[in-house]
Image (cartoon, rainbow, N blue to C red):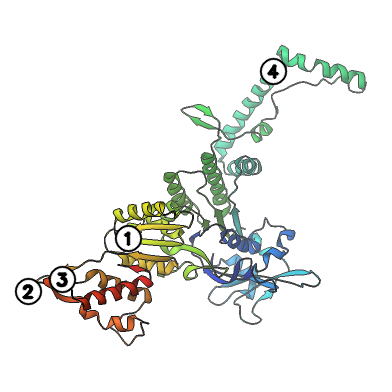
């Protein structure tokens, strides 16, 4: 089972947004764009750790930028359902196996009263969704959520008994017999250790005063003495008190580094979920993880991305700010959240083959530097490394902080701008282009002729951005391009002496092209 789509209407900073998801989805976007809000919307319907109080709508849940909007809804589309889920929802699943879950809320401004409803059905058509009396479906269908503030010690304290019990229950008869013999040895050793500790002079003396005072206070417990002991004498209790430690070549080291703790936390969490995936009563688990890259250097970020994708059979939804992790995800599985006119939405409605298709010629370039484009608000595309260095130095010199404005300068390694243009269009990332004003000789022509290749290239980018083929059909290119398009032929066929000493008419034409292209963000 998986969530294929979510629609948010009037929820927090989402006014009207549909977001498509796939089996392994990466959600990216700037700070405060709504990544956590998106995950929490899914949790309202699928997270069994949320209490009834958590489900109650708050004023902050209603659309932030329109105070008179007094209702919101969160709608999930799920497919590839298992038999348990289909049976539980009875007639609520469509003929093609789709289930729709919806959380909706409304408020009365005058009274301050708020209420919510959870509904399910085969579609969102009128009367297709029926209100559910409870979230009993969470017994077979739920989400497991890991937030960005991970506490390893707390998690181990909460889950270690569960992890130990799972391993204990999976033992063979031979292992149970061998463990029983070892447990008897552990009990004997614990008794001896406790007697030895109690017999140490300073340990015994430390409690002498306490016992003397107790004897003065009560005569009912004179036979009892307070002593220091190592711990439990019951081996099972002693084992329950075990904690994680790290060993290198047999030597024990404390586990304390934030990056290492993060890796251990996610490994334990993934292991726990894999064990539960095999339980018959749990049919579907969806894993949502916020910022798994915390405290990890680039190599480990890439390794972690691969690990989470390959070691969790469930649908996985990850939020991240890491280009390293973005570089490990299939392009069509990346959701880029963007905010425009105070509304958060997903570029191209989320996961889409359009992004995948734009990478057919781009994939070999998807390294950490190129993946940085996913996270930028504006991209300056240039031809080579020298231009990257120049524009970054220029920005520093004139006082433009590129990082503060979330601007990236990326090279296309030649004049291969087209693949970048297609990708940035689909991801709805603003970009400008800087290309050389090349003048090239037309090969195999005698006498020699030349063409204004840079201008022609820029014009091609303009057509690509518009998504039109100028040679097919009638088009309104807009002023001044309506005139310039029909003068394209004047950019080719110039003799060498014209290139060296261009007539005023040619100079004026080239200037018109450059100005028109610059107005569209294409600088020749």
**For the residues marked 3 and 2, what is the alpha-carbon distance in whole angstroms?**
17 Å
The kind of secondary structure element at disc 1 is strand
Q: Nearer the viewer, mark 3 or mark 2?
A: 3
- Answer with mark 1 or mark 3, whichever residue precedes in sequence: 1
The residue lying toward the viewer, choosing from 415 and 400, is 400
Residue indicated by mark 1: 382
Given contact means CB atoms under 8 Å apart, are the residues at marks 1 and 3 in contact?
no
Q: Which residue is mark 2?
A: 447
> Where residue 268 appears, x then y in whole percent?
56, 44
Residue 146's disc is none
Residue furthest top as drawn = 201
Q: Is residue 294 left or right of residue 73?
A: left
Viewer can see residue 135: no
Tell me the CA gap for discs 1 and 4.
73 Å
Query: Measured along the vertical axis of the image, is residue 139 above or below residue 221?
Result: below
Task: Check disc 3 and report its element: helix, strand or loop.
Answer: loop
Circle nearer the N terminus (2, 1): 1
* Residue 180 position in % (x across, y down): 61, 32
Q: Secondary structure at mark 4?
A: helix
Look at the picture and state if 419 lies above or below 258: below
């Amino acid at each position: 089972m998986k969530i294929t789509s979510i629609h948010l209407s009037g929820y927090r900073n989402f006014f009207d947004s549909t977001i498509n998801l796939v089996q392994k989805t990466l959600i990216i976007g700037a700070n405060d764009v709504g990544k956590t809000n998106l995950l929490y919307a899914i949790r309202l319907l699928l997270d069994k750790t949320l209490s009834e109080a958590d489900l109650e709508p708050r004023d902050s849940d209603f659309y932030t930028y329109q105070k008179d909007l007094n209702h919101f809804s969160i709608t999930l589309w799920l497919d590839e359902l298992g038999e348990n889920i289909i049976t539980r929802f009875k007639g609520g699943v469509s003929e093609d196996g789709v289930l729709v879950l919806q959380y909706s809320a409304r408020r009365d401004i005058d009274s301050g009263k708020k209420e919510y409803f959870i509904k399910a059905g085969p579609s969102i058509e009128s009367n297709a969704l029926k209100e559910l009396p409870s979230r009993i479906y969470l017994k077979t269908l739920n989400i497991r959520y890991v937030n960005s503030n991970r506490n390893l010690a707390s998690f181990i304290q909460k889950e270690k008994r569960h992890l130990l019990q799972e391993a204990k229950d999976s033992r063979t008869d031979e292992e149970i017999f061998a463990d029983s013999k070892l447990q008897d040895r552990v009990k004997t050793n614990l008794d001896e250790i406790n007697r030895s500790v109690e017999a140490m002079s300073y340990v015994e003396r430390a409690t002498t005063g306490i016992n003397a005072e107790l004897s003065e206070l009560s005569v009912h417990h004179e036979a009892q003495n307070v002593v220091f002991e190592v711990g439990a004498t019951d081996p099972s209790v002693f084992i329950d008190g075990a904690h994680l430690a790290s060993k290198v070549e047999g030597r024990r080291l404390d586990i304390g580094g934030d990056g290492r703790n993060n890796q251990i936390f996610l490994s334990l969490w993934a292991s726990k979920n894999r064990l539960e995936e095999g339980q018959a009563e749990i049919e579907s688990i969806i894993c949502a993880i916020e910022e798994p890259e915390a405290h990890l250097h680039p190599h480990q970020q890439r390794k972690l991305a691969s690990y989470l994708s390959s070691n969790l059979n469930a649908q996985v939804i990850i939020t991240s700010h890491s280009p390293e992790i973005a570089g490990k995800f299939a392009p069509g599985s990346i959701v880029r959240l963007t905010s425009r006119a105070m509304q958060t939405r997903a570029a191209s409605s989320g996961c889409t083959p359009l992004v995948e298709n734009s990478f057919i010629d781009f994939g070999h370039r998807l390294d950490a530097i190129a993946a940085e484009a996913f996270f930028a608000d504006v991209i300056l595309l240039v031809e080579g490394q020298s231009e990257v260095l120049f524009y970054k130095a220029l920005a520093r010199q004139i006082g433009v902080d590129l990082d503060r404005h979330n601007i990236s300068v990326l090279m296309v390694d030649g004049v291969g701008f087209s693949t970048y243009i297609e990708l940035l269009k689909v991801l709805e990332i603003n970009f400008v282009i800087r290309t050389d004003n090349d003048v090239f000789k037309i090969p195999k022509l005698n006498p020699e002729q030349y063409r204004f290749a840079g201008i022609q290239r820029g014009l091609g980018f303009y057509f690509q951005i518009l998504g039109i083929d100028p040679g097919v059909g009638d088009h309104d290119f807009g002023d001044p391009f309506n005139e310039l398009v029909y003068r394209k032929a004047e950019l080719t066929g110039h003799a060498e002496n014209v290139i060296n000493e261009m007539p005023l008419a040619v100079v004026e034409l080239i200037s018109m092209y450059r100005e028109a292209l610059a107005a569209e963000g294409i600088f020749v």
